[in-house]
Amino acid sequence: MSAVPSPLRLPEVPAAVLGIDVGGTDIKSAVVAASGSVGAVERRPTPRGAAALLDEIDLIATAHAGRFDAVGLVVPGVVDGDVAVFSENLGWSDLPLGRLVRERLAVPVSFGQDVRAAAVAELLLGGGAPYRDPVVVVIGTGLSAVIVRDGVVVAGSPLVGEIGHAPVAGDGADEPCACGLVGCLEAVASAASIARRYRRLSGRPVAGAREVLDAATRGDEVAVGVWNAAVAALAFGLSHVVAALAPDAVLIAGGLSHAGAALVDPLREHLAARLSFHRMPVVEAARLGGEAGVLGAALAARGMAARARMSAAPTRMAVAR
Amino acid sequence: MSAVPSPLRLPEVPAAVLGIDVGGTDIKSAVVAASGSVGAVERRPTPRGAAALLDEIDLIATAHAGRFDAVGLVVPGVVDGDVAVFSENLGWSDLPLGRLVRERLAVPVSFGQDVRAAAVAELLLGGGAPYRDPVVVVIGTGLSAVIVRDGVVVAGSPLVGEIGHAPVAGDGADEPCACGLVGCLEAVASAASIARRYRRLSGRPVAGAREVLDAATRGDEVAVGVWNAAVAALAFGLSHVVAALAPDAVLIAGGLSHAGAALVDPLREHLAARLSFHRMPVVEAARLGGEAGVLGAALAARGMAARARMSAAPTRMAVAR
């Protein structure tokens, strides 16, 4: 599914916000009123370069002038505080985008990473809503998780949830990882790794994991092997998450989640086989599609506005239901 | 180290308590006076079977009659409320031990899991005090963890922290586990497993992991192999904990922690080799040693007595610093 649940309505907070999700192809934006009603998601092409991006964000804000009190901005790549450290697609590095947008628009701006924002939206508004202790695993170019405990996103170090860089056993355990280690979960089970391993093992070109899955469905033995190795590695990694945290649900988000049953059905089987007395969590593909990022951006800005009203700032983001 | 810090004196509370830690090998007990002074820790062999265990607990209580107002009882395995759900080592399942002891002794009884109690004691009274996000790994007959995040013990399912039953790779990955799976961390790295593996691989009798370590120190190659496999497996498992949770410290508690530098020095090396961009946590042996469980049991009973004076019961255990 790729549509925002309709009617989607968030709890009332003290501020209307403008959510902005800067993607590699387009910028999505939506206003969420203080009442909680979500406006239409608008799309504009993402310009190249920091100056053009700032101008485009200004244009979006101007189009919604008077309808928001704060902005939630998310970008791809590595984010550290107010700084967009690196994005290979958008041609910036060490860009203090949070501060620049805050100065340009003269409103409070929350700044964050698109993947994490999308995962939080999935937790709050998508498949995570029925659960207290869910984990969202976002699988695309990379592989990482957002962990929720008792309705609160587990925070601490910015490295919390980077489960892609822990070792797996079995087929693929000799796979070198971009991080410098060998046999990381991400090196076997990310969408990018599935495509890369298939290319190398088959000698055939393939655009992405979707094509590997299609080939596996047609009976291509190399594709079957690569896909099964990814599922087995994911189950291996998840068995450690389940052992440590006993989540009630695991939601698979990101590009690979589009595989749907072809991913989650065998994943359930592999994971169940790895558990003895541990509880088998619900395992499902995420429900929110491409709008998860802009919704997550808006949620972050609403959280910031709510916290600004409280005397003691919490160190962890409370997930209101 | 195996001694309770001396002089160890807890804060004054309204009740004297008898802490009882039922272990796989022996039952430890100690009275903690309302004033906070900690009595000597006594040990008796753990009998097999629920009826014999109840009788033994009754004997311990009788020996201390008149010196306590409440009992803190902790047991190994999985605990859910008043029920000892499962212990693969002591052969019970679904035993309502908390209620049975409460009825037998006719005093308030707090009931909990040994690992969690020991870890909380370590966190409160031992090496955990300087850290915000520590993990305590208790290694004895079993192997499990208590996870603290932002000063609060991560709760949820009673299975949270059961990291011993997730798979490892390398030497020992073919080891059958008492839980029914193969290659669990606990099957390679618990103190009991170290002794069992050494016996099987060497054909020589050994009382426990301590003797295996002594043999390894003397150059016994089988002992070296078994010890190294345990350390490597522990690093493997911890690399998953670090990836998911980015703890600032890992404290090794339980019987195996008595190995001190012989355990934590190579563990640090193995763990560092398993991390790329993830932060290397402080890795230390716990300070409290084998008395942590009985102290934790007493702490829980004292907490129960203190809460009985308060109107609102907290939903999660706060770790006061």
Image: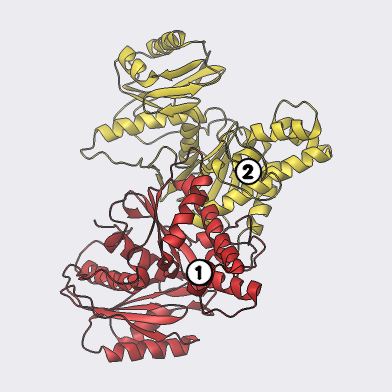
Chain colours: A yellow, B red
Q: Chain of mark 2?
A: A
In percent of width and height, residue B163 lies at 51, 59
At mark 1, the secondary structure is: helix
Taking the image as shown, residue B278 lies to the left or right of residue B7, namely right
At mark 2, the secondary structure is: loop
In percent of width and height, residue A97 lies at 39, 18
Disc 2 from disc 1: Cα separation: 30 Å
x 52%, y 69%: residue: B218
Q: Quadrant of the C terminus of chain A?
A: top left
Residue A140: which quarter of the image? top right
Q: Quadrant of the N terminus of chain A?
A: top right
In percent of width and height, residue A303 lies at 34, 34
Front one among B136 and B202: B202
Give above or below for B256 relative to B284.
Answer: below
| Circle number at residue A183 | 2
Front one among B48 and B101: B48
Residue holding disc 1? B213
